[in-house]
Image (cartoon, helix red, strand yellow):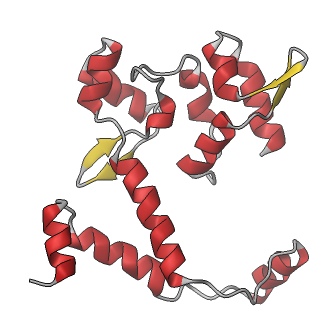
Amino acid sequence: MSPLEELLVRHRIDPAQVERTLRRVLEPAVPLTAGQRHELADSGFDLHATIDPGRALADEAGRQALVGDGYTGAEIAANNGISAGRVRHKAAAGELLYSLIDGAQRFPRFQFDGDGRIWPGLDKVSPQVPEEWSWIGYRNFLSLPSLQLDGSTTTPLQWLAAGKPPAAVLAAMGNNW
């Protein structure tokens, strides 16, 4: 067994998932059309920048680790005093974002307070997240001071945690990002 195989076995990581991730990072993507290249260049994107596959792989591994560290549906149910069926309903309605890992839903922790309870107001905000946003982009939006409300700058999560109206967060989501 190779050192890589030993590491995967020890950490119970699916080799097929690692292979898919490596292929996404290391294999060439579909080439851009001339129009797409022109649009990117006009917006300031450096089309000649080199991509470091090692850095890209490390970034992807970091994202995978964050998702893998997310809560399970059973943990959310227990932390919030709701049924597992209610958690599935919230996920299906887009109220809770999740990723599938080995066929099971894992819910990134940014959606929950320190005790694992769902942040108030996310049930109104999360279903409105633009399709092109990744969950990391959404997490960044919620956790960075971006709202100029009540005379001060606050994060959307702080705003929601204080029980303030989700409409302000929805408006900021549409205007700032």
Residue 75 occupies which quadrant of the picture?
top left
- Point 14% across, 74% down: residue: 6
- Point 48% across, 80% down: residue: 54
Q: Is residue 95 visible?
A: no
Percent position (x, y) of residue 128?
63, 35
Image height of 102 relative to 4, above or below: above
Residue 70 occupies which quadrant of the picture?
top left
Percent position (x, y) of residue 152?
86, 21
Percent position (x, y) of residue 20?
34, 74
Front position in the image: 62 or 159: 62
Q: Number of numbered discs present? A: 0
In the picture provided, is 118 more to the left or to the right than 148? Answer: left
Residue 44 occupies which quadrant of the picture?
bottom right
Front position in the image: 30 or 159: 159
Q: Which of the image's four quarters has the N terminus?
A: bottom left
- Point 28% across, 68% down: residue: 17
In the picture provided, is 60 more to the left or to the right than 144? Answer: left
Front position in the image: 82 or 56: 56
Q: Is residue 152 visible?
A: yes
Image height of 112 relative to 30, above or below: above
In the picture provided, is 174 more to the left or to the right than 156? Answer: right
- Point 91% across, 17% down: residue: 151
| Identity of the residue furthest to the left in this view | 1
Front position in the image: 164 or 6: 6
Percent position (x, y) of residue 48?
75, 90
Image height of 133 relative to 111, above or below: below
In the picture provided, is 177 more to the left or to the right than 121? Answer: right
